[in-house]
Amino acid sequence: MEVIREIHELKARQAVWNSPVGLVPTMGYLHEGHMALVRRARQETATVVVTIFVNPTQFGPSEDFERYPRAFGRDLDLLRSAGVDIVFAPPVSEMYPDPFSTWVEVEELGELFEGVSRPGHFRGVATVCNKLFNLVSADRAYFGQKDAQQVAIITKMVCDLNMKPDIVAITTVREPDGLAMSSRNAYLNPQQRAAAAVLFRALNTACQLYRDGCRDVAMVTRAIADIVHEEHLAELDYAAVVDPTSFEELDTLERPALAILAVRIGTTRLIDNMLLKE
Ligand code: PAF
């Protein structure tokens, strides 16, 4: 496994890469959710490139960029044992040379839900993914379905801008109590960690309502909110039932429907989602 820090080096190596090339973009502090993406990329592509880059432009000024967890040595060990070919881990100056002035924005979709709660977040995500797709010249790029709106935005960007990679979304990997794996789970103390299972309980209840024949969107979102409110350490940011591609709020459950929610536990913000109807 080669670890590359600089863009010119990455470009120089590409001539000898076998096709197809699979890209797994990450911000490091890897967990089983990331490793599921890596394993899928390993199965499907001849050269697997994993990027580790804590992207400053997707963090708001009062967000956790500085304290975002980092464990570079452990990440490399995990990636080496998973048979990854290339790790690209550039410094910020390599990705955003000064002055940097070109940005990618996915309108409408990028202005909903996470876009409201985290202004500028998706502009940073779309821009860095655009750069990584260009740099790696990936045939396929792998993302976790936990960040469903991110997947929808990247898919839309690739389609609108005629970009190369196929976007592959991988099922969310969960802890035994259902909490979706996320690097930010590391911020939770033991009480908060126990409380965080409320996201899964709420989504499961929504799915159960749907399976029991409920087609009333307001009833489903109210059930999610009620369950979150029962957990005194949790504060609901939003709960909604949306179209999985456009993230428009639905008023009927007769078409594909995704239940989404964002919850704050202490200073940690967690998101999750579950398909009610495929
Ligand atoms: O999902 C993430 O970890 C990040 O948003 C990504 C896709 C690596 C872009 O920085």
Image (cartoon, grey):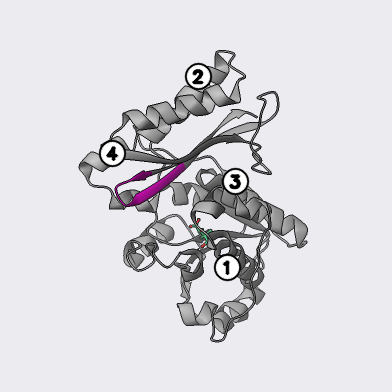
Residue 43 place in picture, x, y as percent:
57, 49
Q: Considering depth in this image, is 120 or 45 the residue closer to the camera?
A: 120
Compare marks 4 and 3 and give the one earlier in the sequence: 3
Q: Which residues are magenta?
A: 264-271
Q: Considering depth in this image, is 16 or 192 the residue closer to the camera?
A: 192
Crowding near the residue tagged with mark 3, few <14, some 14–19, many ≥20 C-alpha atoms within 10 Å: some
**Residue type highlighted by circle 1:** Val
Q: Which residue is mark 1?
A: 128
Q: Which residue is mark 4?
A: 233
Q: Is residue 270 magenta?
A: yes
Q: Which residue is mark 2?
A: 208
Question: Residue sitting at 37 percent across and 45 percent down?
Answer: 264
Q: Is residue 135 above or below residue 257?
A: below
**Residue type highlighted by circle 2:** Gln
Q: Does any atom of ligand 1 lie closer than 8 Å to the CB of label 1?
A: yes
| Mark 4 or 1, closer to the camera | 4
